[in-house]
Image: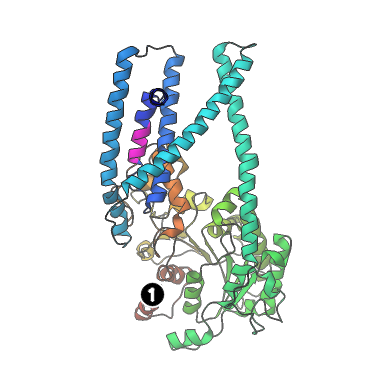
Amino acid sequence: MRDRLWSFLLSFSVVGLLLGTLFFAVSLTPSLLPRTYVTQGILSGVAMACGYGLGVALAALWRWFELPVTQGPVRLWLRVVAGALCAIVVLVFLWRAAEWQNSIRTLMHLPPIETAHPFYVGAIGLGIFLLLLAFGKLFALVVRLIASTSRVAAPRRVSYVIGTALAATLFWTMADGLLLRFVLHTADSSFRRLDQVIEPDTEEPSDPLKSGSNASLVRWDELGRMGRSFVASGPSAQDIASFTGKPAIEPLRIYAGLNAAETPEARARIALDELIRVGGFERATLLVVMPTGTGWIDPEALDTVEYLHHGDIASVAIQYSYLASWLSLIAEPDYGAEAARALFRAVYNHWTTLPKESRPKLYLYGLSLGALSSEQSAELFEVIGDPYQGALWAGPPFPSRIWRKMTADRNPGTPAWLPRFRDGSYVRFTSQKNVLPEAGDHWGPMRIVYLQYASDPVTFYDPYSLYRQPAWMAVPRGPDVSPDFQWYPVVTFLQLTLDMAMATTAPMGLGHVYAGEHYIDPWIAVTDVQDWSDADIARLKEKFRAER
């Protein structure tokens, strides 16, 4: 056993061990969101495995070119020194891990932690590393087997290239064709069953103006779980009037779930017919909403705009998926855009037939994947002759085409996390602090506002962080981004990937969790609210802040 253990320890690559330890250490530094010791251990184990794999690849490349390598006692002493150095680096970084996590927690108004649980982090990280190491050794074994077979007809080096290519193809096919399909199928089945659950505290509406009622074109069970919640919630006319002290009417909420029809076009048609039935086009404001992947619509966004317009507003939405947004982005990235185009086209085509002086003002809204889908509702050239009035897109995901273009072409000197675009007459960006007035009072015929937090990893995830520093990490940084967050090749990419998966675990008003009071100023700007005093706006913000 002693000989086998010694042989196992000597089998590790010195270069791989050094790089793996370095990756493990810097993975303990902060990123956009706080981490628990479990998520930190998983991240550190993956980072160590990536570093070790890179080191092994570099060592293999060194041997490929037949460059000199150490042998005998020198090689043994190098391993001993490398092991000691790795242990020191790991201990020092683990000792500082709590301090780094507290640098984020302080900005997010979370209580500081006394310890980062270094023992648990190390144990979990080591376990993940060994698991991935075993997987890597399996891959190397397959490469050698294929190479030995192909060596009959090809030189030794060429056979290894062939073996690596075929092994990579085999493993990718298995991961994509079997594992990913299994995960997506399981997730789809689970979310589908969850979507069918009717919450006991969500009663079928008796009001004929509500979707799902007996008078509705959409049955209660066709709304889906998120649709039922959307229709049954929200402020009533009495709630709004009691707060504002002014007359109010009941806001209209129209929703068609996945079970309402087979195709997005059919669901859009049902939603349009329902919108016409309840008199949605007779309201002063009409909002076309794209939900997130599961069909969820942020109540903080809809409640605030309904208060601001005294209930004289109708909102219409259709569901396009059961999956969480990040799964929808992987499994069906175009399906949300397809649904958004179908709904917008149906509503817009009817809206353009109405007299301009009496029809409602038309706006778009989306959060997260809903923002990405809503962006793709229509091209500008399709509506320029008779434009809708504007859009509010919150937490736009990093692939959002219009958002990326505006951010890349921002005015010089403005940060990537809060850019200014030209004169601000078409599009503006804002965050927790309202900076919309800084662009002046001039707006064009369409008003587009992006609400985004600097700490939102869904918005600021950067695939290129694998090898270059993201632009939003430059100074000055967002007020909710740790000053200790540093860029490291590969590791920062892994950190942001984990942050994106944990984006909704942040406190309200940070990360990917958007707060009601932060929606109010964007809605005022986009929908041109004029009849609210500064004192009443402050009171409305305080109301939503108190209801967290």
Residue 423 in the figure: left or right of residue 154: left
Q: Is residue 23 magenta?
A: yes
Residue at image coords 58%, 10%: 155
Viewed as shown, does residue 106 lie left or right of 530? left
Instruction: Tell whether position 416 is magenta.
Output: no
Say which residue appears at 55% left-offset and 24% top-offset. 141
> In percent of the image, x 43 and y 37: which residue is there?
129
Residue 126 location, x and y as percent? Answer: 40, 39
Residue 392 screen position, x and y as percent: 50, 64
Q: Position of residue 458 (x, y in %)?
A: 47, 53
> Is residue 362 visible to us here?
yes
Q: Could you tell me the amino acid type at mark 1?
A: Lys
The quarter in which the N terminus is drawn is top left
Image: 387 above or below 150: below
The quarter holding residue 542 reads bottom left
From this view, report whether residue 520 is shown above or below residue 45: below
Q: Can see residue 382? A: no
Describe the colour scheme in one phrase. Answer: rainbow
Q: Horizontal and vertical percent for residue 134?
A: 50, 32
Label 1 neighbour load within 10 Å: few <14, some 14-19, many 20+: some
Identify the residue under disc 1.
541
Q: Secondary structure at mark 1?
A: helix
Q: How many marks?
A: 1
Q: Residue at x 27, y 25 (%)?
A: 81
- Range drawn in magenta: 20-26
Work out whether residue 396 or residue 235 is closer to the camera in this orientation and state it: 235
* Between 24 and 518, the one nearer to me in the picture: 24
Taken as a whole, is the magenta stretch helix, strand or loop? helix
| Residue 275 left/right relative to 157 | right
Residue at the front extreme, as displayed: 1
- Residue 440 in the image: above or below residue 116: below
- In which quadrant will I find the C terminus? bottom left
